[in-house]
Image (cartoon, helix red, strand yellow):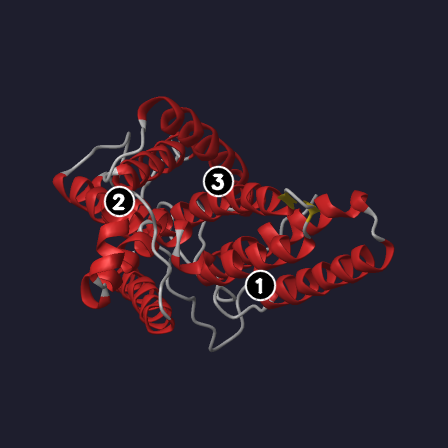
Amino acid sequence: MILRTVRPPEGFEPGPVPPPGPVRTVPPQAGRGLSWLKIFLAGLLLWVASLVVTLLTANANLVPTLILLGSFLVPVTFVAWSFEHWRDEHVTAELVVKAFVAGGVLGVLGASLLETYLLHPSPLLFVGVGLIEEAVKLAALVYITRRLPHHHTRDGIVLGAAVGFGFAAFESAGYAFNALLTVHGLSLNALVETEVIRGLLAPVGHGLWTAILGGFLFRASREGPFRYSGGLLAAFLWVSLLHALWDSMNEIAVVVTFLLTGTPWQYRLLEYGYMPQPTNEQVHLFTVLSNSGLALVSVLGITTLLLTWRGARE
């Protein structure tokens, strides 16, 4: 064999030598794809088709399909959107799916056990719900991502969102199933109403709150095993408070409505443990207060997430 030396052509200049070691990059296509939109439109079309066929045929076998499509459509869409806008060599599609499915299931199971044995009816019931559900989602995120060699804040936000949206999807499926069962038989109207409302509210619920926690968790420990900081504790308490306010907003709106517009006979009924019949003005005020409260909690959560994202170096 004869080895020949190949000389570069005249005018050729070698490019810069890359630095040694792994370089963390975001693929150029990240944030530019529209797979999330295709997922949403395809899923919405399938959900509508399932609803129409179920109504036409009265086939109860299609109800699980309707529940699953309606409960998972928005959570899966937002996970796909967040993955397209931020991913690297650590945040892979396999890890995101694992966080969504395994993290969501572990969170739902853990929350169900703890809430059954630890919570009892009280004025602070929803505070306990917020603390428990945010704690189990955080624990699920720690378990799913425990083997990651590096912890970047924005990675934690994306993976936390995946766990939170997985939790929301499985929880919504349970709510939709319960809404279906009524004393008068199966109610598709109640099922559809529940899925539409929870689908519209899903982006500012569990996924948002766990994304915030994921960012603070990963920020507290850049390398090696997870470490916990005062910032993470403060974020956990803040997110739990937002969760509690969200869950209790109807009750808060009722109390504020009667405090502002209640009459003596309504107060008397409340003292005896009865809910008085509200006037039309009170119904209107309750609706305004409830929706305004949910909007305020959503704005606080979104603002916290944006500050967490922008405050991260990567």
Residue 24 lies, with reference to residue 283, above or below; the image says above
Q: For residue 295, which quarter of the picture? A: bottom left
Residue 140 is labelled as none
Quadrant for the C terminus, please: bottom left
Give the residue number, with chain letter if any, for mark 2. Answer: 240
Does residue 264 appear left or right of residue 57 in this picture? left
Report the amino acid beneath label 3: Ala
In percent of the image, x 79 and y 45: which residue is there?
60
In percent of the image, x 62 and y 52: which residue is there?
191
| First in sequence: mark 1 vs mark 3 | 1
Q: Residue 36, image x and y in percent?
A: 58, 63
Element marked by disc 1: helix
Give the residue number, with chain letter if any, for mark 3. Answer: 99
Report the amino acid beneath label 1: Trp
Graded by Cα atoms within 10 Å as few (under 14), some (14 to 19) or many (20 or more), the crowding at tag 2 reads: many
Q: For residue 196, which quarter of the picture? A: bottom right
Do residues under tags 1 and 3 come within 8 Å of each other at their CB atoms? Answer: no
Report the amino acid beneath label 2: Ser
Graded by Cα atoms within 10 Å as few (under 14), some (14 to 19) or many (20 or more), the crowding at tag 1 reads: some
Give the residue number, with chain letter if any, for mark 1. Answer: 36
Marks 2 and 1, Cα distance to the nearest angstrom? 29 Å
